[in-house]
Amino acid sequence: MLTVVKHTATSVVTIERFIIEEERNHPEATGELSGILYDLALAAKMIANKVRSAGLADILGSAESENVQGEVQQKLDIMANEIIVKAMDHGGRLCAMASEEEPGIIQIPEHFRCGKYCLLFDPLDGSSNIDVNVPVGTIFSVVRKITRGRHGELEDMLQPGRRQVAAGYVIYGSSTMLVYTTGQGAHGFTLDPSIGEFLLSHPNIRIPENGRYLSVNDSYENHWSENARTLMRHYKGLESDHKALSTRYVGSLVADFHRNLLGGGIFAYPSNTKSPHGKLRLLYEANPLAFIVEQAGGAACDGTRRILDVEPTELHQRTPLYIGSKNEVELATRLLAGQRELALA
């Protein structure tokens, strides 16, 4: 675990300097986790470059194939996946990887050394929005290897989110920003394209306890449970005297989450009759974002349980997700458990 190092408002702090200074507070650190974060930052720069040039380089649109989720893959999905794999497989720090875009574990090639960490990632979240220039992102999670063999195994991947040692996301929007945590707060870095470096721009991010925004896909309202419909009416100020939240939903989890993290709010994706087990991926999306939001003072649940306490059983397991400002998530937990009177008190 890393300890936060305070910097003055006028100091220029690159992500590499920030990681190095934090690592110095832990003499026992081997540098492997720091190396993983460096490599991910490099991969993010490469993906950001592809995203910026997408409309000029004929890499928009569908690749006319489907991923393991049964979703149509975009050309940039495939490119982003390949960039991360190639940036991470040779450093000697990972024993295996898993991607939302691939059906099984991605093993480290035999001619490369294996390390003691596993990387799980969504290479390009929100990729269905690429063609219309909506912000997309990358989400990642790092866990420590728990099996004894050289290569990573399914058991290593199927660990509850509370065992993550690092997690983060990158948002490719009007600017490219990387937010990560190692369990000592959440910190944001903005890419300065003029020098090609991620610079510390948002140290010690804190999400407001009460939300301003509600991010939810209302088109599924007829397929929600009555408790979920009541909860949404509550957020919108139609039930009791709860202050109405402004609805903001772009359909890109990273973009919606990032706005709510900085401004306060909740992202909600209830289970429904079409997706009774939820839609978001536990290992690639819910767990890493839940780790970040908790480090920023927020919360995340699946409607009944804290996300980080869910015991995974499948590599591509799905989950309902309520994530964001603490008070809004606590309301969801109480109301979805059927305790309407308590929730509305």
Image (tube, rainbow, N blue to C red):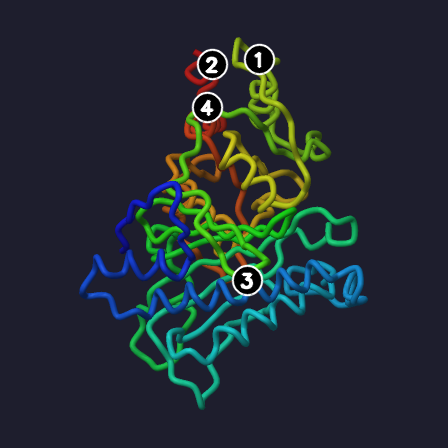
Residue hosting label 3 = 196
Q: CA distance from mark 4 to mark 1?
A: 17 Å
SS assignment at label 1: loop
Q: Position of residue 185 (x, y in %)?
A: 34, 44
Report the mark closest to the observer, 3 or 2: 3
Image quadrant where residue 101 sits: bottom right
Query: Is 150 situated above or below 79?
Result: below
Q: Position of residue 25 (x, y in %)?
A: 21, 57
Query: Is 272 situated above or below 38?
Result: above
Report the mark closest to the observer, 1 or 3: 3
Residue hosting label 1 = 239
SS assignment at label 3: loop
Report the mark closest to the observer, 4 or 3: 3
Q: Position of residue 261 (x, y in %)?
A: 49, 37
User: Quick one: label 1 or label 3, which is nearer the N terminus?
Assistant: 3
Residue hosting label 4 = 210
User: Quick one: label 4 or label 1, which is nearer the N terminus?
Assistant: 4
User: Quick one: label 2 or label 1, which is nearer the N terminus?
Assistant: 1
SS assignment at label 2: helix
User: Quick one: label 3 or label 2, which is nearer the N terminus?
Assistant: 3
Q: Judge from the rendering whether residue 240 lies leftward or rightward of residue 53; answer left or right.
A: left
Q: Residues within 10 Å of mark 4 (few under 14, many from 20)?
A: some
The amino acid on which the numbered mark 3 sits, given as a three-letter code, is Gly
